[in-house]
Image (cartoon, rainbow, N blue to C red):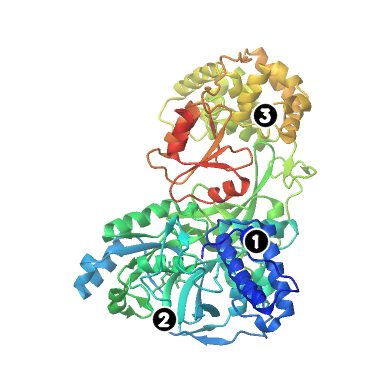
Amino acid sequence: MVAPSAAALGLPYNSVMDAKTLRSRYEELKSQINFHNYRYHVLDAPVISDAEYDKLLNELKQIEADHPDWVTPDSPTQRAGAKAADRFDKVRHPAPILSLANAFGADDARAWYERIRKLDERVASAKFVVEPKIDGLSVVLHYRDGVFVQGATRGDGEVGEDITANLRTLKAIPLKIPVDSGQLTVGGKTRPTANYQLPTYLVVRGEAFIPIREFEKLNKKLEEAGEKTYLNPRNTAAGSLRQLDPALTASRPLSLLVYQIIHSEGGKVPTSQWELLEYLKALGFPVTDVAKRFNDLESAIAYTETWNTRRDELPYEADGMVIKIDDLNLAAELGFVGKDPRGAIAFKFPAREVTTKLLDIRVTVGRTGVLIPNAVLEPVEINGVIVERATLHNFDYIAEKDIRVGDRVLVKRAGEVIPYVIGPVVDARTGKERKYKPPTVCPACGQPVEHFEGEVAWYCVNAACPAQLQRNIEHFVSRGSMDITGLGYKIVEKLIETGAVKDVADIYTLTRKDILEAVTKKDRKTDKEPPGKIADNLLSAIAESKNRSLPRLITALGIRGVGEVSARDLANHFGNLDALSKASVDDLQEIEGVGPNIAEAIVDWFARPANKKILKKLKDVGLWPSASRSTVNRQPSGPLSGLTFVVTGTLPTFSRDDAKEFIESNGGKVTDSVSKKTDYLVLGENPGSKLEKAKSLGVKIVDEAQLRRLVFK
Ligand code: IVH
């Protein structure tokens, strides 16, 4: 059955319907609603609106209220069940629920292969299926005559806990299989289940989890409600499934992917893992779309390794990939070592989260005077790097998470992100931990700190604070700003100490003597050049920096919220610093991308006497660039002018950089995240969560070929 549209459904329930018509209407409603659950929660592609769905469900509920004896366990109304007693019943699994041996790299995987090849020569010509290893909770689902009748946790692998009522609340779990009678289209293709026969008793295994985005949303909601947030998706998923009240489970955004048949009776199921995944999909189970089959181990390893670098594109936490022998009979014959089957191996990704002790919290002062709390950690290795410091974001974060000095804390280091403390491991507390009190004075200059309405951060507002000055200068001389080579951290520190530099403008009146004094004062062990040469180079670098453009100077000033992009727009709009310094909040907001906060920060910056002094000094030394529209580096115009793009997944011929260049050179803009302002999502293979977001915002989706066509119409 292909789902008819809601409008094409049979006659809605009314009291004069005869019993037979009503009964068939009831059956039809059940299968319709199950179908729409599947479209929504498994395929992520609903075909009716929420309102239409609710209407169907209400009609079903009405019939069930009048005919309680008709209600069957596969009715979608049965997802919310009654509370369990004080514990769960035990369930003996029909076959052991096995675990997996680990491989920590390609060589481990090759060693595994060699071992099993020696055991059975058929391994030499075996195919392999690679699947994501989802970091969730293993669950076992029982279907009798196609109806979901029981669900259990893995437990010790022999006996698990009966969490049927909780699992029923997961809309991704089909209550009845197949969801249709075999004509269902999956991924655009019709996959008949005709080669196989649905067993009268089927037990499947899958992994329940909370998608990362849903987890973040959940935590945000809790945070807004002033409640404690959760540490990570895995623990939250596990906790949610072991609630005695199914209503609680239902309120958590749990999902599921199925990957194994544990047991079957009275039917015919595939004997290849690849076909098994297709078969489970055709029955209506949620199945990963990242799996691939390979003819040899090396290709399987290569695929696994590509996912190691792309793991952030997966919508759930994955701690590795599983490499499985495709031939399930061969895999079974290979047997096990303990609880680990020889026919599969978990290829683990490097760890990203570890626990360690929080030794101390130290506060540094940022460029804008913001106080930043940093964790001093007992050194710990994460993914080959020793981590001793991590950010704690801000003081509210420490209070909200109740992070105490001496706590065991969970630390995350992922990709480009600075390591950060996720939260305390409360169960590991000994009572010796100390609650943390934020400082009331700046740790660098001792002046009282201030807090601004509506902001979580605390600031040192002392314009003469040496820590701030240091950060300001570091920013002023950095690459994207005035780009002055030779003004490193150490020498700046000394120039501040000797009093030669009291603000950024003083850089331009530095004498050879000032520099020599600072150079000889600083730790010179690392310098290969004589002080005189260092001073001369620095003086010429400073002189040369006077030619920098207006956008760069605006960036260099370090106004809160003004980065390279807004600096370019401001330069473009106002033409020089005189005009910009006189702009009002309203004037500033006329510029696209400048909101009320940035506008206020700009006005505030120019109003401060210390900054007025800086501007005057800059003008006096002749550093006063202006921007005529033609000199400002503006985006080229072209067929994509005015359009904003986001790229996700792997494109067939463009690399990410190629795609960006292509779009920009044709006048378009490329941003990193999808928002209401995005015009197009350029979609490649294996996209991440951006696709979902684009769909939910109604952003147009194009592939690489369509993108090219936008340009070469
Ligand atoms: S296969 C014989 N496949 O990883 C089959 N396991 O560390 C053994 N897991 O307990 C399991 N995703 O909970 C398999 N695609 C996947 C998986 C997967 C996650 C979990 C599973 C298992 C653990 C082993």
Q: CA distance from mark 2 to mark 3?
A: 62 Å
Residue 607 in view, yes or no: no
Is 518 drawn above or below residue 284 in the view shown? above
Give 112 or 451, whichever is nearer the viewer: 112
According to the picture, the residue beneath numbered tag 1 turns out to be 405
Marks 1 and 3, the one that precedes in the sequence: 1
According to the picture, the residue beneath numbered tag 3 turns out to be 592
Closer to the camera: disc 2 or disc 1? 2
Q: Under 8 Å from ligand 1: the CB of mark 1?
A: no
Q: Quadrant of ligand 1?
A: bottom left
Instruction: Give x and y (percent) for residue 585.
Output: 77, 28
Are the two marked residues, 2 and 3, in contact with CB atoms closer than 8 angstroms? no
Give 610 or 712, whichever is nearer the viewer: 712
Instruction: Give x and y (percent) for residue 98.
Output: 41, 77
Residue 298: quarter of image: bottom left
According to the picture, the residue beneath numbered tag 2 turns out to be 264
Left or right: 8 in relation to 208: right
Q: Amino acid at mark 3?
A: Glu
Left or right: 563 in relation to 276: right
Marks 2 and 3, the one that precedes in the sequence: 2
Are the two marked residues, 2 and 1, in contact with CB atoms closer than 8 angstroms? no
Residue 142 in view, yes or no: yes
Secondary structure category for the residue under label 2: strand
Q: Mark 1 packing: few (<14 Cα in 10 Å), some, or many (20+)?
A: many
Left or right: 84 in relation to 336: right
Q: Amino acid at mark 1?
A: Val
Q: CA distance from mark 1 to mark 3?
A: 44 Å
Q: Amino acid at mark 2?
A: Ser
Marks 2 and 1, the one that precedes in the sequence: 2
User: How many numbered circles does the render carry?
Assistant: 3
